[in-house]
Structures are given as C-alpha cells and as structure tokens.
Amino acid sequence: MRRSAWLCALSATIATLLASCGQKPDAAATGDWRSGIKEVRMAVSGSNDDPMIVRRRGVYQAHLAKALGLPVKLYESSDYNGVIQALSSGQVDLAQMAGGSYANVDAQVGELVAPILSLRQAEGGTGYYSSIVVRADSPYRSVADLKGRSLAYVDFNSTSGYLVPRAKLREQGIDPDTYFGKTGFAGGHTQAVMSLANGQFDAAILQASGGDPEHGFSRGALHTMARRGLVEVEDFRIIWTAGPIPSEAFVVRTDRPQPMIDLVRGAMGALPYDEPDLWPELGQLDGSAYTSVNRDHYKDIIALRAADLAQRRGQGGRP
Amino acid sequence: MKRSLVAGLAAALLTATGAAAAEPLRIAAISPKAGPCAALGAASPAGEKAYYDHLAKRLGTVVQRCPVASAAEAATALAAGKLDLAVLDRAAFAPVSGTARAILTLRPQGGLNRIVIVLAVPATSPARSLVDLRGKTLVLGGATPAALAVPRQAMADRGATTGFFGQERVEADGEAAAAVLRAGQAQAMALHAAAWQRLCPKVAVKKAKPCTDLRVLARIRPQASQAIVVRQDMPLDTRYRLIGIHMPLHLENATAFAWASAWSPKAAEFEPTEAQALVATP
C-alpha cells in the first residue's frame, strides 16, 4: 500500500512536470530575477524647486521600491538631453519622458527602449496640448500679431515646447524659422514662463493639459508656477494651441528582466486606484489613470522628429 | 530510502524545468463538471491555451485550470485558498469581500475608465451622504459621457436611480453647474474628477473662487459588474505582476486577450482597479 502510494506520488510529480513543460516558463521569470541587481535606476528631469515634483518623485520612488523589492535610485538631470542619454546608454533602467524625447531615444537605440505606460484622462483622451502664451497686458491676440516678434521655445528636445508647434505652424503656412523676429531656447517650461513674465520674449510656447482649448486647462507650466505662487494664471493669455499630443510615457530598457518590467507596469498602473486621494495631490490629472502603450502610440511623434532633424541637417543644423 | 529517492527525483526534475521556486497559479474556470486543478488538456481551445501559456511564460510558473460549477463556487474556493484567481460578479464577490479583492476590470472599446465622480453640496448643506439628497435637485455639468453617463451610473449603483432626485438639471460645463448650485437652484452637483479639478484648482488664481463654499460629499466610481479577483493576502509581487502582464495583453497577444476578456464583450483593454470595485462603497 505504502509502495503504491509512493509510486502514485512519483507518477503524479512526473505527470505534472511533463504537463508543465508545454507551458515553457521563461527562464528569466522562473529564477530570482533580482539576483545580481543591486538597485533599479530611474532618470528624472524637472525642477527641484517645485515641491510637488519633488514629492511626486519621492512617492514614485517609494512605491516602485516596495513593488520591486529593490532600492530605486533617482538619477536627476537638469535638462531633457540628460535623461535621453542616460536611457540610451543604459545607465538607467527606466524614465518618464515626453514623446519627443522618446523619439530621440528611439532614433538612437530602437527597440532597446520601449514605452509601456501613458495616461488616459477622465474624458478618455490620452494627450495634451502645446500653446503659444503671451502676457495678458500685451496687444497680441493671434499668431498673426506675432509676426516679427520674439518667441521662446522650451528646449530642442521638448515635444510641446518645440517639436509639435513648429510642425503645426508649418502646416498653417508659417515658417517658424523666418516668421518670428527672434527665437531662442528658454531651457525649460519654468524658464519659458519667466522669460515671458520678465519681458525677455513677446511669446512663449508652453505645455497645457488637464483640459482642452474649448474647456480650458487645469495643468501645465502656467498652473504649476501659479500653484507655487510664482505667477498668476490671469496675467497670461493663450492665443494658439496645437494638439492633442500623445502624453508622456514611462519608458523602460527592454534588455532588463521581464518580471521587472511587468512589476513597474503593474505597480504604476495600480497607483491611482490604490491611492486615489494621493493621486491628484501629486499633481496628476484627477480621474486619470495609466494605460498600456507601445511604440505605435508615438509613431507620429517619431516621424515628426525625424523630419525635423532632416530639415535641420539640410540647413546646417541651425535652430 | 524510497521516500528520499522520490523526493530527490522530484527535486531534480523541478530544478531541470526551472519551476522549483514558483507555486502554480490556479485559475477558476466555470465548467459543467467541477474537479481538481490541473494543467490544460490537449484539446483546450486555442485562446485558452494562448492565455495560459502567456501567463506561465511571464510568471515563470505552472498555470492550472480549476473547474468550478459557478462563480459562487469559484469565490468560495478562492477564499479557501484552493485557487488563486477568478472572474467574479458582484453577487459572487459579496460573501468573500473580506478576504478577496478585485485587481482588474475591462474597459470597453470607446469607453472610459471607471473614473472618479465628485458629488458636492454647498458647505452649509445639512446633507451628509447621498441618501440625504433624495428628492433634491441635482445639477450636472457637460454633455459628454464623462459628465453625464458616468455620474448617473455611479449614483444609480448606490441607489439613486431614476426618480431619486426631485429634479436633474444639465448645464453646459462645471462652471455653469457650480453657478446653479451656488445660486441655490440645485442642492447637489456631480462632476467627474477632472471637471472638479478645473473648477477648483489648487492655484493662486486672482478671481476664481477657491471652492471653500462647497463641500465634497463623496468621491465614488461606478461599480464594476465583473472583475478579476484574487485573495487579499496574495503577495504584492504576484499581484503587481499579474496587473502588469494583463494591462498590455491586447497589444502583445490578441488571441490570449480575446479569451481572457470574453466575459465582457467588446473589451478594449484590462484596467487596474481598486480592491472593492465590485462593491458600491459609500
């Protein structure tokens, strides 16, 4: 009796194992994928002066560390290019970046980096807007009024502050390289607002989100600075918009262990549902949630970036 | 001697297949004939096989099918630790809500996420919950599904069905709705969370009212009708990995997604969800 029980147990074990062979567990997924990984590295950019951004980073860092079971180290960069290069070179494992930056990464390393998450807003949209902003006390009411005037871009690698608005202006028959009297790079959205407020430029191109041109916006550079008490929203006027532009993405190195990628996606995806009161306090659009994306989601931005680079090369690389 | 031989052989085989550390994932399958959890049979449908293979590969574990007679039996087995994952409806979930939790729902094609609705009243209102608003006038702001259908659904899930409110007004947007509320022409206002955030931004706007004259009565989501449910004591690692594997399933494996989402026609994608999504929380 005991002998037959052993044989049954042995047979059952073998049968189970043979049955499982057909499902081919992934080698990286079966073992301890954390083996040999000391930490997960995430690149971030943006102003350390904004308490909400600092807080958001801290929450993401703690949330991911808890989910991954590994320390998460933040690699801070003061500009877009720092994040792009850190991800392209493999110095970091993941980052949050706008479509234009991802397009630059894609041009450098292709499938070695992939977007995995972006935000779906309450109304169902997955994009945000680029806006041309002027001071409310200025006479400018339209782009036509800005002919020969000065315009501040955000950064060459900015999607809403450079790439998309320039393409949209060209579509509307305006050559952004000759139409304005002077253009320049402010270096960031915050700097663009300040250069406008200080009178350095007549207009600035800024990100606007949390709404649409019809209903107004509740997020973006102006609102971020207004929340910090640095400017008043009503001191500025939006005179032009372009979009919607696919929202920024969480991007990962695809040569990292698949369980790590799945954990990042799952943990971040669950955050607005696990912490519904905290979510808007992090500066996120209330009612928004993460949705899965892949490279196709950004193919138009990738094409725009390629076209812009080709044009710049054709004119000697000048901005 | 024989016992150690069997154990040694089993350990060697487990190591060889790479399945040593992982517990099997046991999935409830409504079936006319209940039975023990087991690997999928060779005659299983292609979609089911694709789904199980996808999970097995990504989790690095064996995935087993657990035939159960009904969703209620699946819930009981889940709570008893006899299986790990089940698709439950509200009725099946209710008895196990203390030990189980929802992790994923399905967003329909062209549909919205299960977005948060803000139910607000004047700060001076005596109302303390939705039930106190019976017979009162409700104002909504906007004409989109997010502004109309979702708030109506979220409140209907909590008993405020047709006829609950004395009157329902629909204004053009959140600002217009708030104006009606502030004028005393309505006693409650329901906006989706983004509209509320636009109405009451946390910024130093010169002329905007900071909404200190309004009080949030409830922040609620529409109740899910079905969800993928696991035990509350499932390790965080496993829960997040399951979410992270299911979220992009429609992009990565259409055959597996079609099978896994068959309980909700015209599904677009899996969406993470709160633990009590199947309950109409106050």
Image (cartoon, rainbow, N blue to C red):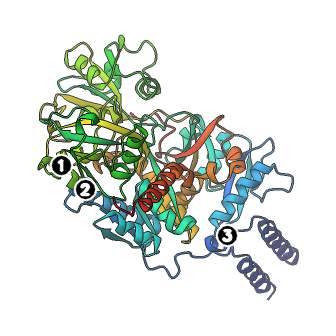
Q: Indicate the amino acid at tag 3.
A: Asp
Q: Residue A201: give its label.
A: 1
Residue beneath the point at 40% across and 38% down:
A173
Chain of the residue that carries numbered disc 1 in the rendered image: A
| Between discs 2 and 1, the one toward the N terminus | 2
The label nearer to you, 1 versus 3, is 1
Q: In which quarter of the image is residue A27?
A: bottom right
Point out residue B27 in the picture as x, y percentages from the top left corner. Answer: 68, 53
Residue beneath the point at 65% across and 40% down:
B72
Q: Say yes or no: labels 1 and 3 on the same chain.
A: yes
Q: Residue A26: give its label.
A: 3
Residue at mark 1 to residue at mark 3: CA–CA distance: 56 Å
Point out residue B216 in the picture as x, y percentages from the top left corner. Answer: 27, 32
| Between discs 2 and 3, the one toward the N terminus | 3
Point out residue B226 in the picture as x, y percentages from the top left corner. Answer: 58, 38
State if disc 1 and disc 2 touch (CB < 8 Å): yes
Point out residue A285 in the picture as x, y percentages from the top left corner. Answer: 34, 43
User: Toward the viewer: B164 or B122?
Assistant: B122
Chain of the residue that carries numbered disc 2 in the rendered image: A
Q: Evaluate whether residue B169 shows in this view.
A: yes
Give neighbour class at mark 1: few <14, some 14-19, many 20+ (Cα, 10 Å): many
Q: Is residue A68 above or below residue B226?
A: below
Q: Indicate the amino acid at tag 2.
A: Gly
Rendered-image quadrant of the C terminus of chain A: bottom left
Q: Say yes or no: labels 2 and 1 on the same chain.
A: yes
Q: Is residue A48 above or below residue B44?
A: below
User: Toward the viewer: B142 or B212?
Assistant: B142
